[in-house]
Structures are given as C-alpha cells and as structure tokens.
Image: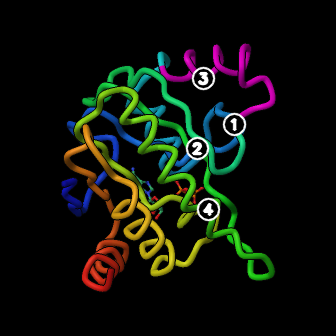
C-alpha cells in the first residue's frame, strides 16, 4: 500500500528519493517549480538535461512523458522531469495530465524510489484549475502507485492548493 500525504512547502526542500519537476518540453529550465529546482539544485541538473537533449531527447520531452536526472544539491536522490499539458477550455487534456503522474511513478519505481514528492503539475503558468488538477493527481496516484513506492507526497505551495488536495483526498 502506498500512502498519500500532503505538505505545505517547497518541492526543493523535500528529503525524498525522487522529486518531480513541472518542466517544459525543452528540459532547459523555466519558471515556477522548474526555476526553483534548478536554482536550489545547482548546475548539475541543467548539465544532465543538456546531455539528454544531446542524446535521445533531441527534440525535447513530449507532454505527458517523464525522464530522470540527478538531483544535484537538492536533498533528494533524483529529479523526475515531466511536462504537463497547458490547460485548454476547448480540448480535454486530462489524459495527458494523468500521464504525467503515471509516467513519473513508473520511472520512480524503475529507480527503486520509495518516497516521491510531486508538485501540483500544470496548475501554475499552464493554467490548470487547482481543484481539477488535484482531483486528477489524487485519482491517478491512487490507481497507479505500487511497490517499491511507499509514500507519495504532494507538496503544495500555498494554502489554496493544500485545501484543494485535502478535498480531493477526501472525495476520491
Ligand atoms: P506548470 O508550468 O506545470 O503550471 P508551475 O511551476 O508554473 O508549473 O506551477 C505548478 C504549481 O506549483 C503551481 O501551483 C505553483 O504555485 C506551484 N509551485 C511553484 N513553486 C513551487 C515550489 N517551489 N514548490 C512546490 N510548488 C511550487
């Protein structure tokens, strides 16, 4: 059984085996979670991302996919970069958001990670409504998390996000 937990704080401060980055397809950094991870983790993470771009990920990482690198100076072992969908009012992209959580969990399991921390993917610059983002996150992780992952921690930056995840956990 995997335990789902909520904490209010920064993804950069989590002492876990893997933290998930809400990256963009370039893998070369951005704002929000991405900027915070690269700032706190140092240049080793960006160097690893550049190596990925020079190899198998020449065209970047597709939306809904995930890939792991070192966590540099973060208090975690690995960063799993995933690219959330930009929210759309005309097209249902929920399957891509669910895919981010599922693929990140699959990579975490391949790495032997027992603890993994997720931010609320796509709910920042990418505009996904927080309640719906929380619902997709919780239902996907509940359905997909399996050994060796023992704890999936959602790290919420503000009170509104924390409350949305609380409601999603209670409802699912
Ligand atoms: P996206 O581009 O996928 O929307 P963002 O990084 O812009 O990603 O935002 C995703 C969510 O993470 C937002 O709810 C934002 O408030 C939150 N967030 C921003 N910085 C951090 C951080 N350091 N730790 C955890 N969550 C964060």
Q: CA distance from mark 3 to mark 2?
A: 11 Å
x and y percent of residue 104 in the render? 47, 43
Residues at marks 4 and 1 touching, judged by CB atoms closer than 8 Å? no
- Residue 119, disc: none
Instruction: Name the residue tied to disc 2.
Output: 23
- Residue 61, disc: 1
Residue at image location 26% in from the left, 42% down from the top = 147
Asked if the magenta segment contains residue 87, the reply would be: no
Residue at image location 68% in from the left, 70% down from the top = 87
Residue at image location 55% in from the left, 17% down from the top = 48
Instruction: Name the residue tied to disc 3.
Output: 49
Instruction: Name the residue tied to disc 4.
Output: 125
Q: Residues within 10 Å of mark 3 (few under 14, many from 20)?
A: many
Q: Secondary structure at mark 1?
A: loop
User: In this picture, which residue range is highlighted in magenta?
Assistant: 45-61
Q: Secondary structure at mark 2?
A: strand
Residues at marks 3 and 4 touching, judged by CB atoms closer than 8 Å? no
x and y percent of residue 37 in the render? 44, 37
- Which part of the image, by quadrant, shows the N terminus? bottom left
Counting residues from the start of the chain, the first of labels 2 and 1 encountered is 2
Nearer the observer: mark 3 or 4; the answer is 3
Q: CA distance from mark 4 to mark 2?
A: 11 Å
Counting residues from the start of the chain, the first of labels 3 and 1 encountered is 3
| Mark 4 lies within 8 Å of ligand 1 (Cβ measured) | yes
| Mark 2 lies within 8 Å of ligand 1 (Cβ measured) | yes
């Amino acid at each position: 059984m995997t335990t789902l937990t909520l904490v209010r704080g920064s993804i950069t401060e989590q002492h876990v085996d893997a933290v998930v980055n809400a990256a963009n397809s370039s893998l070369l950094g951005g704002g929000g979670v991405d900027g915070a991870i690269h700032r706190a983790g140092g240049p080793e993470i960006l160097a690893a991302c550049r190596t990925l771009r020079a190899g198998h990920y020449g065209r970047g990482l597709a939306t809904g996919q995930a890939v792991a690198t070192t966590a540099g100076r973060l208090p975690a072992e690995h960063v799993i970069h995933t690219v959330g969908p930009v929210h759309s009012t005309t097209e249902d992209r929920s399957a891509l958001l669910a895919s981010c959580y599922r693929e990140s969990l699959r990579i975490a399991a391949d790495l032997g990670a027992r603890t993994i921390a997720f931010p609320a993917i796509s709910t920042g610059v990418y505009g996904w409504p927080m309640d719906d983002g929380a619902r997709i996150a919780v239902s996907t992780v509940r359905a997909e998390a399996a050994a060796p992952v023992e704890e999936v921690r959602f790290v919420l930056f503000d009170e509104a996000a924390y409350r949305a995840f609380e409601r999603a956990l209670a409802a699912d």
